[in-house]
Amino acid sequence: MVQYSTVSSTPNAQLTMPATDVFAAGSTALVTGGASGIGLAVAKLCRSKGMKVVLVDRNADALQQAEKDVAEAGSSDGVVSIVADVSQQDDWKAIKDKALSTFGSIELLALNAGTGSRGTWGDDDYFRVTLETNIFGVVNGVNTFLPVVRDAAKTKPTAIVITGSKQGITNPPGNPAYNASKAAVKTLAEHLSFDLKAETTTVHLLVPGWTYTGLTGAAAGKDKPAGAWSAEQVAEFLYKKMGDDKFYVICPDNDVTEATDKKRMLWSVGDIVKERPPLSRWRDEWKKEAEETMAKTQV
């Protein structure tokens, strides 16, 4: 449990409160990638708790509709949207200026924006855009708003949520730039959590499972697959795990359980420990052993 006091921001405070106390009426959340999917669901969750919300996205049309949708989750005021590209450092100055001039503080920083385009070796734009958006969207956000969140932490509960991906952990073949970017995001979030361990601001790595979003068919109007979770389920799971003061928020879905995820992660790290070839779970000569080993593994 995080140590927190409205009098002191030191870890010697007297009160013990869950990380979900950041979802407090009157506090402000800034959510990147907030125009759709998981970002929009998190923003609605924040608004339903009485928080003020700053929505950031590069899709101006979707952002305009999202602002209306989030406002409906609470009262009509208290929501502002900002069109910006999170990969661009200059855009973050404009985000900071508008957010603080409108609401004065940021208690919850949710760095969710990302791109999931596909490509392969030799496709320079695929690598550049993916890495710039997914990695520097986090780096720029933390560098810009960490001092703001620390200042808010003097008097209120604060938190930083960073959205990663299971592909950044188990590393399935087929999308090297995306996997590498999300592996970097995981590392950045882990270091941020460690570096803030003596402070009251909590840090959480949100790792969605199969989720029905614009990246997985929702934007094209496809029906939600039975195996996928909704974005709202992911937001609810995040809230639950923050209530348990967990850093790793590894979401299951309707096809993959938490136990299955853990077995896959254990097999993946075993490639290093046991000196197997990388990505062995997907290699023909290792598939059978991987399946049999995971079936017997207890987690």
Image: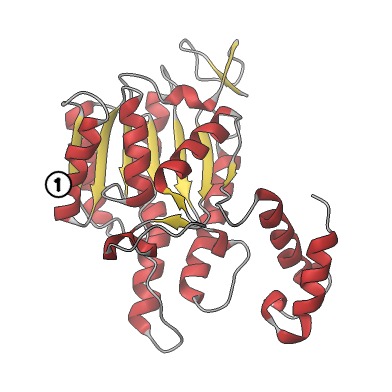
Q: Where is residue 286 in the image (x, y as percent from the top left)?
A: 77, 80
At 79% from the left and 63% from the top, the residue drawn is 294
Q: Quadrant of the N terminus?
A: top right
Amino acid tagged 1: Gln
Which residue matches tag 1? 64
Q: Where is residue 85 in the image (x, y as percent from the top left)?
A: 25, 58
Q: Where is residue 179 in the image (x, y as percent from the top left)?
A: 52, 68
Q: In this view, does 196 lie above or below 209?
A: above
SS label for mark 1: helix
Taking 130 as reference, is 258 left or right? right
Residue 276 visible in the displayed image:
no
Instruction: Identify which residue, 228 or 237, lies in the foreground.
Output: 228
Residue 182 visible in the displayed image:
yes
Instruction: Identify which residue, 195 or 274, lies in the foreground.
Output: 274
Give the number of marks: 1
At 46% from the left and 47% from the top, the residue drawn is 162
At 41% from the left and 42% from the top, the residue drawn is 232
Instruction: Choose top left, top right, bottom left or bottom right for residue 27.
Output: top left
